[in-house]
Amino acid sequence: MSPFVIVIFGATGDLAQHKLLPALFSLYKNKHLGDKFYIVGFARREFSDEAYAHMIGDELGVHKDPQWGDFAKNIYYQQGMFDEKDGYEDMIKKLNGFDQEIGACITRLFYLATPPVNYEMILENLSATKLSEGCGPAFAEATAGKQGFDKSIWTRLAIEKPFGKDIDTARALDKKLVSIFEEKQIYRVDHYLAKETVQNMIAFRFANSIFEPVWNKTHIDHVQITFAEKKGIGRRGESFDGVGMLRDVAQNHLLQLLATVAMEQPKGFSKESVRDARVNAIKAIRPIKPSEVSERVVKGQYAGYKEEGKVAADSHTDTFVAMKLFVDTDRFTGVPFYLRAGKKMAEDVVDIKIVFVQTCHLLFKEYGCPEVGNVLTIKIQPNEGIGLRVIAKDPTSPEASRGKPRLALATVDMHFSYQEEFGHKGVEAYERLLLDILAGDQMLFNRSDELESSWQLISGILKGWDENPSENVTYEVGSNGPQEANVLIEKDSRKWL
Ligand code: BG6
């Protein structure tokens, strides 16, 4: 890989410490980063380069790792306030120093890993100091007036979700972004797109010819998508409170998971074809009117949330959300998609369950059939893999009686596990994303129309909640969420599986 520099804004935050730096270290250990690279942490607190690297080493518990020392030599720190130019100007000197060391203009990746409230001021300062233009003023001069000069080779910007707070703020942020960077320089991150099991959906659905004929409203009864975490908000009170699960997880990860099930076959394997297919699926989701919200959406908060650090004592923030959606395409019209996401739940699990129509064949009617028959489970995590529940004759069924044959049906699971098959669960999502950004591949990143469509849907729900703020229900820590989420699906004579 060619030399590069990655500047992480929000270098002392959760994302930098728990996702980005571990991913970079792992890429380094697996020899994916090349010989020359520079990681610059940018944040408000004072640190020397060494102290920052040491703090990261502590946080990751890797000081004893024999490769940590060499890796840490590539870590630098820049103190700065996001809204003041000084830090950015000092950083120019630092970055120019790296260019001089290499003897060339090297690729710069600015990674916005701060709470979203800082995005606009960071973008403004990147633009005001011309950091957005590659190798600072020298670069601007060298390229002035040159038509078709490809800036994306030198400067890239990665921006984390949540991208905006609603449709209007998302649009405003995007406007700012595209006024400073060209589309091909922008990487809007949703790390769920880079999970191996999510990427595999295209291969699974379209390379196995047995699934396509049944992947439709005739054969699929409904789809369930579950995103459950045992952890609460931890130290994220400041950035989570007022944001909530709907914006933090549903607007992005859950809708992307839905899109993998609902999308049509992409025209090709190019970045735009795949992104078109995703966008079309999200656009086809039937909007929820504010007046329908109380019937189709459940908003919950775990008991004790208001006592968490940096959370408002009267907070209405959702730590759980469940909803029923419809995708109005020929393939799926009328098939409900039930989605739920929650913190402080009974277990850590993210999966998609495709529940097929269950008809009890005439042959078995008098012996009884299982209530739920075939279910295809895409296990996003943990135990990454795919399971298929099928019906089998139960060999333990009682002896024949009163002249009838011995026969009972049971459901059994067939499964594929990444770990068992490949000895590996796939490349970690942030490693994949960083590699793709550095390679200039935007397929696994959101395009702005994708975000626009998902925010359209989510904004309708937010509006419904605004109009009726008492929607929040409390649920017990370690449970499966509020009872209301069960009612949401049970009133359709179905259950969460
Ligand atoms: C993030 C959310 O995008 O995804 C967090 O902001 C959530 O709230 C996290 O915990 C889950 O990611 P993963 O990869 O650990 O499932």
Image: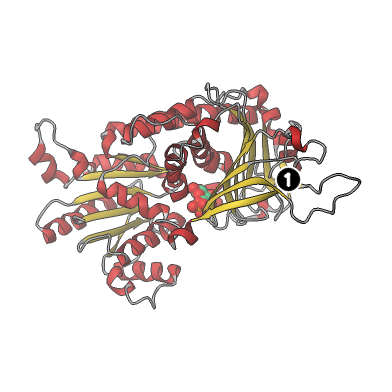
Answer left or right for 149 relative to 352.
Answer: left
Q: Residue at x 57, y 26 (%)?
A: 460
Relative to 331, is 420 above or below?
A: below
Quarter of the picture holding the N terminus: bottom left
Foreground of the two, 90 or 54: 54
Q: Residue at x 51, y 26 (%)?
A: 456
Q: Where is residue 83 in the image (x, y as percent from the top left)?
A: 35, 45
User: Helix, strand, or loop for circle 1?
Assistant: strand
Foreground of the two, 55 or 291: 291
Which quadrant of the structure image shows residue 265?
A: top left
Q: Residues within 10 Å of mark 1 (few under 14, many from 20)?
A: some
Q: Which residue is drawn at 33% across and 36% down?
A: 269
Answer left or right for 14 relative to 30.
Answer: right
Q: Where is residue 490 in the image (x, y as percent from the top left)?
A: 75, 36
For residue 181, say whether it is visible.
Answer: no
Foreground of the two, 8 or 89: 8
Where does label 1 land, which residue?
A: 474
Q: Where is residue 117 in the image (x, y as percent from the top left)?
A: 44, 42
Q: How many labels does the image show?
A: 1
Quarter of the picture holding the C terminus: top right
Foreground of the two, 410 or 269: 410
Residue kind at label 1, given as amino acid type: Thr
Answer left or right for 314 relative to 444.
Answer: right
Q: Where is residue 217 in the image (x, y as percent from the top left)?
A: 59, 27
